Image: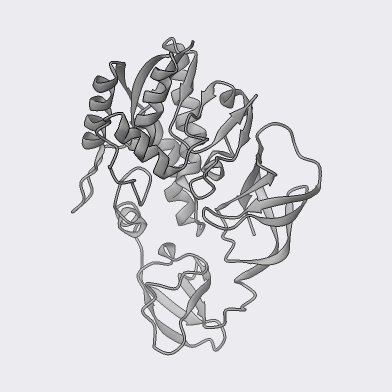
Amino acid sequence: MSKVYVGMSGGVDSSLTAALLVEAGHDVTGVYMKNWTQDLPGMRCPWADDLADAKRVAVHLGIDFKVFDFEAEYKQKVVDYMIDEYKAGRTPNPDIMCNQEIKFKLFLETALEDGAELVATGHYAKTENGRLLKAQDENKDQTYFLYRVSEEALKKTLFPLGGYTKPQVREMAKERGLTTAAKKDSVGICFVGQIGMREFLSQYVTTEPGDIIDRQSGKVLGRHDGAIFYTLGQRHGLDVGGGLPYYVVGKDMEKNEVYVSTNLNDDSLWLKEIKLSSLHWVNSTPKDGVYRVRVRHRAPVVDCELRGDTLAFTEPQRAVTAGQSAVLYDGDVCLGGGIVVQ
């Protein structure tokens, strides 16, 4: 059996991960990654509570427990990246960057230097000889967030929950008396708990009010408090007129203008083809051809044709947003993907 360092976040998934590895006979050490501890006005960062929950589970399981402080690297690699992307008018995914730079790079390297042979996390995914495969639970599958992890890192990683559904995980945690069995999943930004993106960004960027403009008529419909806060396809939070609902169909960061339309068939909302940048393939570069792709978390997996750094969809896709990731699949195998340029 192996010496395994488990990333324990204080949630039910990583708690059960540690328990299953102990039961499998591994020499397990729990590790809490201290990535973010900053409180924001009116909102308390839950890191201390999560650390306490992770410690309780480690004590219950009788395993060693450590804290790795990655706060400085996290701010630089994940938070600053996210803020810069929003400033540029794009919509990034910080969870993907966290997996690439922190969990499966910095955590992995630090654990191996500390004597670990393998690392493990509570992600819903599977690995097989350095390949990344979808989890059993299609609804919870997290390969979309893991597509930028390297083959070398995957060969050193265990995902014990890949074959279980979320209800099964909660039941198994309850059966083992884990105190986190009924703990709610974290929502919102990956590193600051319940806070919304607008509230978070407001602490780091200065914004100016600007016009919300009807793309069809050119008429100014209202005012916004910063184009940075709006994303393609957004319907809520526009606060413009009654009648048919308006959707964001574009924005101009230099002019600080947000463009909206009531036309669900607006060309800006539906794309037949996209360009990708920062391509990352888990194993080897796939040949041009027909694959399946997910263009954002929770989006359905749809047919596409890969041509170099271009993806052509069989059917036009709605609200494919610059800065998000398009992740390719061949059956259950996650091949990798890239960042949407548009």
Question: At 30% from the left edge and 57% from the top edge, which residue is drawn?
Answer: 199
Q: Position of residue 248 (x, y in %)?
A: 50, 73
Q: Is residue 8 left or right of residue 295?
A: left
Q: Position of residue 230 (x, y in %)?
A: 44, 66
Image quadrant where residue 132 sits: top right
Task: Residue 2: tell me if it is visible.
Answer: yes
Q: Is residue 276 left or right of residue 70?
A: right
- The tally of labels here is 0
Question: At 57% from the left edge and 66% from the top edge, which residue is drawn?
Answer: 319
Question: At 37% from the left edge and 78% from the top edge, which residue is drawn?
Answer: 223
The C terminus is located in which quarter?
bottom right
Q: Give 181 or 308, whichever is nearer the viewer.
A: 181
* Residue 113 vertical placement versus 189 (above, below): above
Q: Residue farthest to the left?
A: 42
- In this figure, which colouring scheme has been used for the structure? one colour
Q: Is residue 135 left or right of residue 272?
A: left
* Residue 295 vertical placement versus 226 (above, below): above
* Residue 277 vertical placement versus 209 (above, below): above
Q: Position of residue 227 (x, y in %)?
A: 43, 67
Q: Position of residue 338 (x, y in %)?
A: 63, 46
* Residue 143 vertical placement versus 221 (above, below): above
Task: Residue 75: tell me if it is visible.
Answer: no
Q: Is residue 299 left or right of residue 24?
A: right
Image quadrant where residue 76 sits: top left
